[in-house]
Image (cartoon, grey):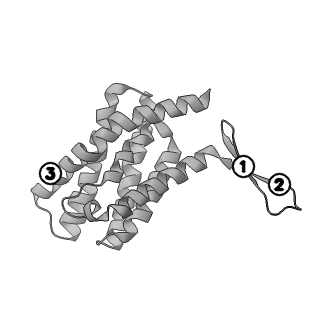
Amino acid sequence: MVHVDKTLFYVAIHHDFCRPVMQYKISLKLVTAIVIAATYASLVIVLQSISFGPIQVRVADMLSPITYVTGFEGVLGLTLGTLIGNIVSPYGIFDVVIGTLCTFVYSSINWLLGRVFGYRKWLLPVVALVDALVVGIFIGVILQGVIFKAGEPIYLFALLTGENLVATIPGALLLVPLIRRYYQRLAR
């Protein structure tokens, strides 16, 4: 049985018929971070054939702009999800470390934009552009260009274009407003 409060989940667990019900309080922020991490990692793992490479379309990056409205738990969830998802990367430990750092940087910038400016519709494309530029620098230039010597400008351009068109723009324009409405309902 699960009871949802504004800030806590109360989870009742029956151990057997003789013992009383035990309740555990779980922070809603912790649950949010776990759900974001699990969603991101599973999208990367299931769609790994298009999630890695010089020209990649990482569908899981649709979740990237949500830290603009979710708070720091979104930053932690995305960073953890990237760490888990990149374990299957053909680039090995380099992608695990650089990709996770990349996610932490852009999601922290988005979180700071949300804290400084509040929710502004005109900032949604800016949030998507920040994500694409940081990914282009970290993955396109550092990982692909410097470490694996595949760094032609066309790769960086293709990566930025793919990230913008397929993932971050729809994520910013569709997911962020939906998640913001969800958070507003929780606050009531």
- Of 34 and 67, the residue lying toward us: 34
Q: Is residue 144 above or below residue 28?
A: below
For marks 1 and 2 on the same chain, the one whose residue lies earlier in the sequence: 1
Q: Which residue is mark 3?
A: 157
Q: Give the alpha-carbon distance from disc 2 to disc 3, as whole Å.
A: 57 Å
Q: Is residue 149 left or right of residue 64?
A: left
- Residue 65 image-quadrant placement: top left
The CA span between labels 1 and 2 is: 10 Å
**Mark 1 or mark 3, which is nearer the start of the sequence?**
1
Q: Secondary structure at mark 1?
A: loop
The image position of residue 120, as x and y in percent, is 38, 26
The residue positioned 38% from the left and 57% from the top of the image is: 43
Give the labeled residue for mark 2. 21
Reply above or below: 130 against 119.
below
Badge 2 local density, few (<14 within 10 Å), some, or many (20+)? some
Element marked by disc 3: helix
Q: Which residue is mark 1?
A: 1
116 relative position to 141: left or right: right
Of the two numbered discs 2 and 3 on the same chain, state the one appearing first in sequence. Answer: 2
Q: What's the residue at 37%, 65% (across, down)?
A: 86
